[in-house]
Image: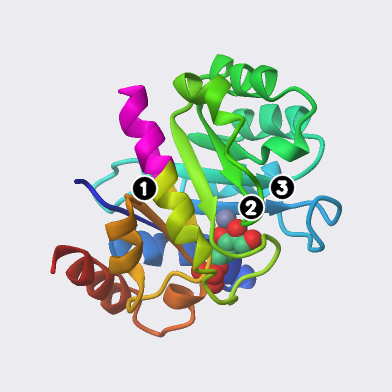
Amino acid sequence: MTYRIAPSLLSADFARLGEEVKNVIAAGSDWIHFDVMDNHYVPNLTFGPMICSALKSHAKTAAGVAVPIDVHLMVQPVDALAAAFAEAGADLISFHPDASGHVHRSIQAIKSKGCQAGLVFNPAQPLDVLDWVIEDLDLILIMSVNPGFGGQSFIDSALRKIEAVRRRITASGKDIRLEVDGGIKVDNIRRVADAGADTFVAGSAIFGQPDYRAVINAMRAALAA
Ligand code: DX5
Ligand code: ZN
């Protein structure tokens, strides 16, 4: 299993975002997780495509290898902003099915722009829509907190949901990443991996510590143990 760590910029220092992206990539990030909130679908407001575009040139390793920008849209409606993020350099774009009037259309619109497409499920959101669209997805993102804020506690029912998604991915026979978002720390990441997740968003756990590399290394050690 290839595990990926995706630090969430939501907990970065917004006055130094470019530097934060560089530093967290130097510390070993696999992806950069970019949380887009519209103060409508969720009760908070963050950043838009202009900021994504400004950060794109910073999203690479010292050797010049591009690090994917993983855009998590917490917006309603979805399609216009998804298109704007595709233009702004997003590599993956995920949205909440309950925020889109036409989920299949939104997925196809993202893919037609050359981006990978993901669906995001809130803690109380059922997985039924996957019956009809799983074969079109590159990513499934399970929320282990209610979206809108960093620093919340992991909701345990997410573990059962991750197990259920893993079974669906296996049954589909497709190469789909299973990402989890919210309350991920060094001391629970292994449990979440055991449930079937392969990609881990972490905001406050990483940006809340002075040494990003130490946290990411500790997460990798927990995953390897
Ligand atoms: C919450 C966001 C998360 C958030 C996670 O709505 O989608 O990506 O940054 O933050 P932590 O890791 O602090 O729970
Ligand atoms: Zn997120």
**Mark 3 or mark 2, which is nearer the start of the sequence?**
3
The circle drawn on residue 122 is 2
The circle drawn on residue 48 is 3
**Mark 3 or mark 1, which is nearer the start of the sequence?**
3
| Residues under numbered marks 2 and 3 in contact, where contact means CB atoms less than 8 Å apart | no
* Crowd rating for badge 2 (residues with CA inside 10 Å; few <14, some 14–19, many 20+): some
Is 176 a magenta residue?
A: yes
Label 1 amino acid?
A: Lys
Q: Is residue 180 left or right of residue 71?
A: left
Quadrant of the rendered image containing residue 78: top right
Extreme left residue here?
A: 225
Residue bounds of the magenta highlight: 165-178
Label 3: which secondary element:
loop
Give coordinates of residue 116: x percent, y percent: 48, 28
The circle drawn on residue 60 is 1
Marks 2 and 1, Cα distance to the nearest angstrom? 30 Å
Q: Is residue 129 left or right of residue 135?
A: right
* Crowd rating for badge 1 (residues with CA inside 10 Å; few <14, some 14–19, many 20+): many
Marks 1 and 3, Cα distance to the nearest angstrom? 20 Å
Q: Nearer the viewer, residue 114 or 172?
A: 172
Extreme right residue here?
A: 40
